[in-house]
Image (cartoon, rainbow, N blue to C red):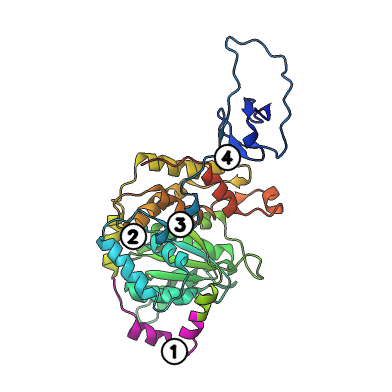
Amino acid sequence: MSIGTFNCPSCGQPLTLPPSFTGAQVQCPQCQNIINIPGQSVQPVTPQPVTPQPVTPQPVTPQPVINNPVAGSIGKMSLAASADTGLNTPTRQLFNKITDEVAKVFVGQEELVLGTLVSLFSNGHVLIESVPGLGKTLFVRTLGHVLGCDFGRIQFTADLMPSDITGAPVFNMKTQEFTFHPGPVFTQLLLADEINRSPAKTHAALLEIMQEHRVTVDGESYKLDPPFLVIATQNPVEQEGTYNLPEAQLDRFMMKLIVNYPTEQQEADILKQHSQQKNLGEVLENEIQTVSSPAEINQAIQANADVRIDDALADYINKIVRLPRQWPQFYMGASPRAGLALMQGARTLAAFQGRDYAIPDDVVQIALPVLRHRVMLTAEAEVEGQQADQILTDLIRTIEVPRL
């Protein structure tokens, strides 16, 4: 028994629906658009006279929204969420050593730690949004010491100039010549603290640096030594004295991570561990070991590029990236750079698990951090209070997961 027959609002395809579809979503078999079925029964549509066709079209029962078998992993970055664990490879051993050392000082926030390491080993950058006081500076300093990399920090303010980031030529009185003095960006782990408190011209100074890994001043280019990771933090845009980052700047970040308050137990551990006013420099020198080096990190980055991605998985990633461009709640979808970030991030996450192949679970774990800052809600969706993460989650659930 059906609840009625009606035409698809996009292509006019006649659809016949059974009673179980009431209040659900369906996908039109003709145009592939998602249709919301009302909670009440659909009244049959009175057929309109049409010109006879050689073949009379028969009503087609649409396919329901696909029950995504990896839906529970969407937006939850955790190696424990994946059941497919590989061999004890050098990359997996390195990842475990790094996380063990970081955990000695930095409590909780698994998604922040995992997302940052995935970006680092994928040649990407990270944007972190959180309120002040959640330990972002502590995390980056600890990570720099554990990795054996140089650490730099820039506090963004409203009067910060681009030359304060890149450096500038300084006149030498002895030689009567200008000598370039490098700015704080010449490092390997750069913490750009409260980046959205500076105007757009200062943000633009980071564009070439993040993409090209080089600085151009007065027509001369200076290369940055790899690895190079920018970890930018921003306050929620509702706070006073903040600027929205332009879309071109946001697209340069591989991931946007949302850091929330710790759990009750984690906060209790933080109070016990960091309430004695110990000098952080002494703690890092005496209690935290350096377990890696820039050369070893670069070698791991090159090895991660060899992780295999099946053609079916590549098509799955392509569908995830392209579908937001057609979704009614978004007026701007993700760029092709998002697809590249998903592919390389899936490779890195698989390598952390000791696998030489990626699986759909690797993709959906990083899908929200990769996409959430690249899509823009329509004005109507914002007024209704809809969230990009929830819309993206519903969107990914409609895409069929490949069987590898």
How far from the left and from the top, in percent, is residue 134? 53, 75
Could you tell me how far apart the alpha carbons at marks 4 and 1 are, in whole angstroms? 53 Å
Q: Height in image: 353 above or below 280? A: above
* Type of amino acid under label 2: Phe
How far from the left and from the top, in percent, is residue 144? 37, 73
Name the image quarter holding residue 123. Answer: bottom left
Q: Height in image: 153 above or below 23? A: below
* Type of amino acid under label 4: Gln
- Badge 3 vs badge 1, beta-carbon distance below 8 Å: no
Q: Height in image: 21 above or below 236? A: above
- Residue at image mark 3: 254
Name the image quarter holding residue 92. Answer: bottom left
Q: Which numbered tag is attached to residue 326?
A: 4
Q: Which residues are magenta?
A: 269-292
How far from the left and from the top, in percent, is residue 72? 49, 53
Q: Which numbered tag is attached to residue 342?
A: none
Local SS, label 4: loop
